[in-house]
Image: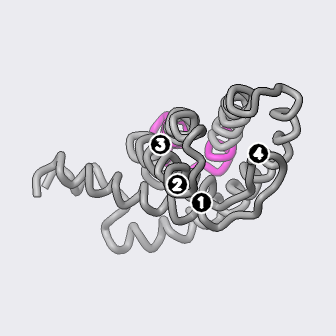
Amino acid sequence: MNKDGRYVVYVGMFAALCTVATYIKVPFGTGAMVHLGTAMIFTLAILFGGKYSGPSAAIGSAFFDVLMGFSPYTLWSFFIKGIAGYIAGSVCHARGRNGESFIQNLLALLLASVWTLVGYIFAWTAVIGSYQAALGNIPSSLMSSTMGMIVALPLSIVLRKALSKAGYLKLDNSLNK
């Protein structure tokens, strides 16, 4: 399989993981939810960087919205979660750290969480039609992001060891074969 084909397969596989992880949820507020999709996005960002986590988050989150009947949010989720994944992954892998600095990873996830919160306030306002109702969803967004960080930071450490041992941590190197 050529380099472009492998990249598409990896992004597709990671998008599917984001979609499935988002199914693990607890409804909260007026349309918002606490779920593990954010944990998957953050884990991918730490392990593989923005090149993979951005498109995977965009596709996986939008696909979840379509499957669950949240079509008014589909385009919003595509951009909000896609950019969040890209921000997190790019910052985690900045300055040659490759997702191995806990402090840098934490900062990356916090930045992505702030972006997600601001983005969804706009989305909720547009879809629900009420800024006040949108503000009522802030706690669930913060809870999803916090849960995402709590899961992703230790999970990425464990997965890094296993993926490194199996030779799957450096996906870009495998694309050059």
Residue occupying image coordinates x 52% and y 65%: 20
Q: Is residue 72 left or right of residue 127?
A: left
Mark sitting earlier along the chain (2/4): 2
- Residues at discs 3 and 2 in contact (Cβ within 8 Å): no
Q: Name the residue under label 3.
A: 58
Q: Which residue is drawn at 63% across and 39% down?
A: 108
> What separation in Å lies between label 2 and label 1 (alpha carbons)?
7 Å
The residue sitting at 11% across, 58% down in the picture is 1
Which element is circle 2 on?
Answer: helix
The answer to whether residue 161 is left or right of residue 77 is left
Q: Which amino acid type is shown beneath numbered disc 3? A: Ala
Q: Is residue 100 visible?
A: no
Residue on which disc 1 sits: 22
Residue identified by numbered label 2:
64
Residue 52, percent from left and from top = 39, 46
Q: Can residue 132 be seen in this view?
A: yes
Q: Residue at x 57, y 34 (%)?
A: 76
Question: Which circle marks residue 141 in the picture?
Answer: 4
Left or right of 41? Residue 34 is right
Q: Are marks 1 and 4 in contact (CB under 8 Å)?
A: no
